[in-house]
Amino acid sequence: MLKSRTEFFSYFVVMKKSFRNLLMVIFLLISAHSFAQVPEFDRLEMLYAQHHYKLVYRKANRLLDQPDYDFSQIPTFYKSLSLFQLAQNKHWLLRKPGAMKEAGELFAQVRKSADGYKVLTAHMFEVSALKKDLVAYAEDLKRTGENKKFEELNEIMLSMFDDIKEIDTDGMNNNQPKPFRSPASTPEREELVAYAKQFLGVPYVWAGDDPKGFDCSGFISFVYRKSGKELPRRAVDQYNGSRKLKEKTVEKGDLIFFDNGSGISHVGMIISHKGESLVMIHASSSKGIVITDIESSDYWMKRIAGYGTFLD
């Protein structure tokens, strides 16, 4: 029993704070999972691709301090990669002499996790590019007589990258385009693709679903509405609700889904004819609505999760 008005007021304040905190947690969980793309993870990926390693390191650290992001190894992965890059800077290394060792430990943590294989497979482009960078750095260390640093780095690379295959990190591969087979597109599919192309250049906006700005699933939902199809809002639900296809049967207007290591994370619409090299139109988090040749990009090829359609 509360014995005084002061005790009652204190109790009320505590309960109000607890309720507010609970609402905040629920909001964060809904925000993180309501849409397939987690904007914080997209931001890490984009900044790393732009070589903003210090910023990636700081943002990854902040995410790791928030329990709401414990469901994924992505922050740990990008903290590791950014540390590997930063540790090659002599000035950074003076302030943080254990950076290279810490990077190796974080990378090992990702590999040993339950989702480690998915994360590394989905981000093989970045990992392979990093391996090339570190090989070149190790050669520099050996050439300049910095044997202690060379031996430390060599030991880390042997344990961390022993089974990482080299890929073409300029984003192109040497595969020849698939032989052309006669188109099977219907007028409905042709019109759908033509309609989608009208929005080229529209900026990316997280949770956006109109011509002011789109995210990946918002763009697909909006375009499909042109054909009278109401799709689920999230990319993962679009994948689950679609009729699954094999690659060889994919036609214009069908959907392609990607997994970044934490489940379905991106969706695009195929705009190439059946039998041609896969080309999609999609909402890129860094460029907005663009057209991408999937088979000319190791980045996207490594992330393909499957194909589906809502068209007849």
Image (tube, rainbow, N blue to C red):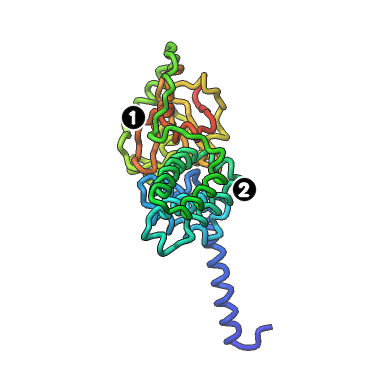
Give x and y (percent) for residue 205.
Answer: 37, 46
Hey, which residue is sitting farthest top in the picture?
182
Mark sitting on residue 197: 1
Residue type at mark 2: give it. Answer: Lys
- Depth check: give the residue in front, 196 or 284: 284
What secondary structure is found at the residue carrying circle 1? Answer: helix
Question: Seen in the image, is 80 located left or right of residue 137?
Answer: right
Note whether 22 is above or below 195 in the view shown.
below
Give x and y (percent) for residue 118.
Answer: 57, 40
- Depth check: give the residue in front, 288 or 180: 180
Residue type at mark 1: give it. Answer: Lys
Q: Is residue 219 visible?
A: yes
- Disc nearer the start of the sequence (1/2): 2
Question: Seen in the image, is 109 located left or right of residue 217?
Answer: right
Q: Is residue 206 visible?
A: no
Residue at the image position 43 percent from the left and 39 percent from the top: 216
Mark sitting on residue 7: none
Mark sitting on residue 112: 2
- Depth check: give the residue in front, 151 or 49: 151
Residue at the image position 43 percent from the left and 40 percent from the top: 132
